[in-house]
């Protein structure tokens, strides 16, 4: 082992400041060899295979590799550069190959099969049963029973897919970074809030330019689309955003989309499945694409009449206000915001002074303390990968260590857009020692300006609570095995802890904890709280239709045979037919920047946001009936959901928590789509 390579030494916390970019590739390659040795020892053992010497040994193998790759790929998302992206392209096929070397190792599979065949007589607990089932399926679902020529074909597909999804993401990031809207005439900025203009001016200053610069990063793009009166500028920015990866140039993603979809389909067929979605959904609560399709269509039936009514209302409003004959996509956020202000006399600029980032962070910590007894203490002696990152030691009510928490809040050129939760170290128990997790959330909120701190829009407040909900799932994990710990659950269950926590943002009892004016310290006025609550369902039909359209687009790529698809745009238009409200924009394409399904883990799984909303609405009804800070309900949620990870089937865990299966009507009631 390379004793000079910091990544291969023993460390409790990721040693970010000591890692050199050139350390990553050799560390990953050596960690692969270490993991390979551990697998070989397991295979070469002459002992009769048992749960302990085979299944558990396999589960705890490769810890060094897991640690090094978690650091590397998280950095590739949050603080990347061309060199790191190049390394990612080089190591991804190696990692894919190693994974297949394990899954397609016939001697190893024989041992696992031998243990699996005795499972009824092994007296395993539920977690052990789940681990055995998961390991066995990981092999059978990924080619262990295939003949060697088909296994080789599978290896090539997996290698190619790992490269293509990385390339897809790199193109989207490069497209986002290379565009800027540079304005030198202040008259064109009418409608934009002063604080937002100040941020755009400081961006221009940092680039030695006059005027104001706006970008496709969310903290810049979303407020511009919401407030800019200049319709031509909104159009220009919207067209740039909507055409990422769709320019027939070196950053074009059309061929990547087609190749990824076709390779996923070919892989699924090779493994005996009808489509990629059939393969994926076998290991989800939803079980089949037919069930997902039925779920989406059922939601569409309820949402579409409301969405069409809202769209007509918005069209009429835009015509009355500005004589707009045809509402376009770049008008959506602007006129929605204007109508919202008219109906509720409420906008983000009124609310933002009450949502200073530091206070919202304190607020989410206080909510976690009241619900789960957690304490967050910021520490400054933990290594971090960027000065913006904050680090916290998390303890319980008895002062015992629970987790290490990293938080990274502001956009940078090396950081992909959006918000996500990630893990640097899983929770697990080994040799009687409960290893506590290292959890991180990454967001893209407006940076503090020269005159004022970072003030969040209400949508950013809910985003912070959402990602923190994921973080709680990781932090409160209390399982034996790392692969069943925290958010390692069925994909359509993983959004429950995140989405349910968003509900606290709408409650007076929670808002009063942190929504205080950044200058005066005054609590948010009751009338604003009332309006936040009242406006929660504003344009809910259209918002639901939008989410359903993404789920349907996902299924259109993954639940059928896509091999005949030649034209990404035409394929997409067909998928959007049932949910279309706005006129199509020929130069725009959603699929070519749909990172969730072509780079992230949401392929055949985008429906899970709506699916989890059913779970979260039903869960929050339970809290509401008993008090949003009810210790009894919080304890049940912690014991049966947050701490149990993937140790049992999620529906069983949910029924233990709730006493019954979730009721879809809870979501429809909350959304105002059916009467309470």
Image: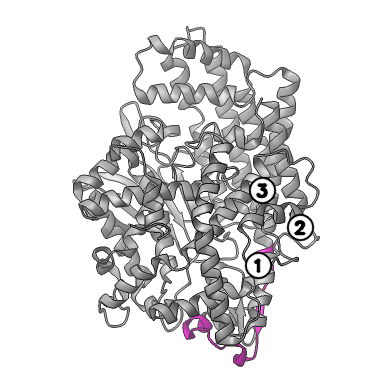
What number is the disc on residue 252? 2
Position of residue 648 in the picture relative to residue 567 (left or right): left
Earlier residue among tags 3 and 1: 3
Of the 4 image quadrants, the one containing the N terminus is top right
Position of residue 676 in the picture relative to residue 348 (left or right): left
Position of residue 174 in the picture relative to residue 229 (left or right): right
Residue 467 rendering spot, x and y as whole percentages: 42, 55
Q: Nearer the viewer, mark 3 or mark 1?
A: 1
Residue 519 rendering spot, x and y as whole percentages: 31, 82
Of the 4 image quadrants, the one containing the C terminus is bottom left
What number is the disc on residue 241? 1
Report helix, strand or loop for mark 1. helix
Q: Is residue 69 visible?
A: no
In percent of the image, x 61 and y 37: which residue is there? 277
Q: Is residue 191 magenta?
A: yes
What number is the disc on residue 202? none
Earlier residue among tags 1 and 2: 1
Residue 487 rendering spot, x and y as whole percentages: 43, 42
Would you identify the image quadrant in which residue 382 lies?
A: bottom left
Q: State the residue position of label 3.
A: 166
| Within-10-Å neighbours for mark 3: few <14, some 14–19, many 20+ | some
- Marks 3 & 1, CB-CB < 8 Å contact: no
Q: Is residue 534 visible?
A: yes
Earlier residue among tags 3 and 2: 3
Report helix, strand or loop for mark 2. loop
Please give the range of residues in magenta. 175-198
Q: Nearer the viewer, mark 3 or mark 2?
A: 2
């Amino acid at each position: 082992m390379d004793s000079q390579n910091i990544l291969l030494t023993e460390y409790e916390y990721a040693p970010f400041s000591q890692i050199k970019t050139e350390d990553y590739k050799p560390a990953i390659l050596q960690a692969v060899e270490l993991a390979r040795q551990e697998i070989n020892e397991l295979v070469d053992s002459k002992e009769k295979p048992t749960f302990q010497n085979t299944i558990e040994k396999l589960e705890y193998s490769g810890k060094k590799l897991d640690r090094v790759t978690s650091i590397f790929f998280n950095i590739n998302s949050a603080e990347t550069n061309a060199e790191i992206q190049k390394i990612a392209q080089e190591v991804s096929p190696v990692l894919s190959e190693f994974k297949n070397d394990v899954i397609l190792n016939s001697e190893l599979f024989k041992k696992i099969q031998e243990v699996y065949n005795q499972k009824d007589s092994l007296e395993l607990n539920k977690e052990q049963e789940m681990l055995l089932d998961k390991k066995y399926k990981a092999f059978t679902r990924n080619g262990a029973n295939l003949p060697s020529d088909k296994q080789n074909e599978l290896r090539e597909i997996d290698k190619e897919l790992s490269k293509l999804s990385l390339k897809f993401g790199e193109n989207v990031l490069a497209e986002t970074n290379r565009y800027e809207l540079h304005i030198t005439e202040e008259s064109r900025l009418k409608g934009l809030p002063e604080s937002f203009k100040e941020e755009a001016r400081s961006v221009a200053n940092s680039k030695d330019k006059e005027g104001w610069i706006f970008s496709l990063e969310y903290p810049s793009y979303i407020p511009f689309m919401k407030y800019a009166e200049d319709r031509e500028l909104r159009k220009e920015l919207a067209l740039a955003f909507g055409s990422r990866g769709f320019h027939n140039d070196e950053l074009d993603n059309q061929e990547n989309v087609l190749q990824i979809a076709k390779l996923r389909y070919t892989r699924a067929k090779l493994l005996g499945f009808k489509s990629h979605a059939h393969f994926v959904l076998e290991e989800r609560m939803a079980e089949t694409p037919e069930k997902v399709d039925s779920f989406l269509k059922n939601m569409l039936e309820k949402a579409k009449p409301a969405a069409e009514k809202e769209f007509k209302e918005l069209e009429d409003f835009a015509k009355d206000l500005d004589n707009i004959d045809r509402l376009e996509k770049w008008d959506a956020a602007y006129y929605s915001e204007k109508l919202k202000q008219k109906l509720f006399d409420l906008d983000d600029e009124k609310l933002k002074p009450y949502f200073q980032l530091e206070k919202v962070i304190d607020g989410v910590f206080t909510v976690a303390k009241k619900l789960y007894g957690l304490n967050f203490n910021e520490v400054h002696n933990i290594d971090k990968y960027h000065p913006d990152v904050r680090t916290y030691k998390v303890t319980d009510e008895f002062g015992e260590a629970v987790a290490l928490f990293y938080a990274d809040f502001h956009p940078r050129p090396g950081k992909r857009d959006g918000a996500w939760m990630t893990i640097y170290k899983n929770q697990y128990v080994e040799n009687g020692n409960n290893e506590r997790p290292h959890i991180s959330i990454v967001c893209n909120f407006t940076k503090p300006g020269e005159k004022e701190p970072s003030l969040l829009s209400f949508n950013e407040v809910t985003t912070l609570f959402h990602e923190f909900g994921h973080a709680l799932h990781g932090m409160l994990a209390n399982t034996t095995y790392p692969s069943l710990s925290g958010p390692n659950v069925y994909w359509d269950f993983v959004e429950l802890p995140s989405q349910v926590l968003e509900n606290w943002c709408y409650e007076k009892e929670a808002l009063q904890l942190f929504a205080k004016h950044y200058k005066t310290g005054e609590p948010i006025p009751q009338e604003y709280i009332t309006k936040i609550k009242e406006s929660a369902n504003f344009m809910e039909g259209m918002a639901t239709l939008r989410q359903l359209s993404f789920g349907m687009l996902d299924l259109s790529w993954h639940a059928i045979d896509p091999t005949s698809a030649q034209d990404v745009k035409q394929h997409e238009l067909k998928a959007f037919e049932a949910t279309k409200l706005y006129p199509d924009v020929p130069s725009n394409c959603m699929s070519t920047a749909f990172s969730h399904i072509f780079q992230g883990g949401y392929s055949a799984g985008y429906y899970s946001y709506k699916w989890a909303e059913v779970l979260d609405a039903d869960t929050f009804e339970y809290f509401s009936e008993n008090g949003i800070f009810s210790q009894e309900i919080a304890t049940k949620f912690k014991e049966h959901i947050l701490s149990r990870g993937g140790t049992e089937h999620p529906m069983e865990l949910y029924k233990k928590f709730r006493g019954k299966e979730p009721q879809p009507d809870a979501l429809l009631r909350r959304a105002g789509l059916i009467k309470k």
